[in-house]
Image (cartoon, grey):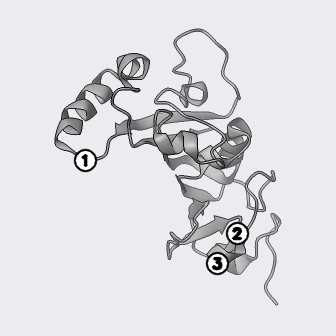
Amino acid sequence: MEQTHRSGVQESKLAGRTVLNLGCGSKHLPDALNVDLRNSAHPDIAHDLNSIPWPLPDNHFETVLLADSLEHLRDIVATMEEIHRVCRDGAVVKITTPHFSSANSFTDPTHLHHLSYFSFEYFTGEVEHGFELYTEKQFRRRHAQIVFYPTLINKLIWRLANRYPQAYEWRWAWLFPAWFLSFELEVVR
């Protein structure tokens, strides 16, 4: 019989796995611990990520991947705090999510949030307008990018939007909708 880790995850499922693939769906990664709500996705762990705490150990993971998952979760702050809990200091968190101007972002009834280029500033301390951070759990922004569907005109829009993200989101986003956002954060303890 497999021994269960104090977090509830079987030790054999954690063995050697330092990558956490949250909301994996059918995108399983062989060396990652793949977590999804649906058993039909055949995850390593079937768990509702809205149910916190997650059955995962503290300070274990070096990399967390959330590809098109975060916008489906009820509480982004609680989710980011839980990611912080399960990660080691310096762990990398890679997030992709539809941009708030994306048509899919508004038509998919399971999208609970519409994120922007600046959404994670409340976790990194980069907030310019003086509001307090939402949590004491800190991250450092390593990379943020507005990504566009690859067309000839979008190559120019891509460059301008990433050079002037505030102007893009305030003025151009509705005229030239982005495809998705890509973030890379680092856990700070």
Tell me, for residue 38, which label it has, or none. Answer: 2
Quarter in which the C terminus is drawn: top right
Between discs 2 and 1, the one toward the N terminus: 2
Q: Which residue is mark 1?
A: 150
Relative to 127, is 103 above or below?
below
Q: Name which residue type carries label 1.
A: Pro
Note whether residue 43 is visible. Answer: no
Q: Position of residue 150 (x, y in %)?
A: 25, 47
In-front residue for pair 45/2: 45
Measure how far apart labels 3 and 2 are at the Cα level: 7 Å
Q: Position of residue 176 (x, y in %)?
A: 33, 30
Q: Position of residue 108 (x, y in %)?
A: 59, 48
Quarter in which the N terminus is drawn: bottom right
In the rendered view, does 159 fall on the left or right side of 170? left
Note whether residue 35 is visible. Answer: yes
In-front residue for pair 7/155: 155
Measure how far apart labels 2 and 1 are at the Cα level: 32 Å
For label 1, the SS is loop
Q: Name which residue type carries label 2.
A: Arg
- Give the residue displayed 39% in from the left and 43% down from the top: 179
Q: Which residue is mark 3?
A: 42
Q: Name which residue type carries label 3.
A: His
For label 2, the SS is loop
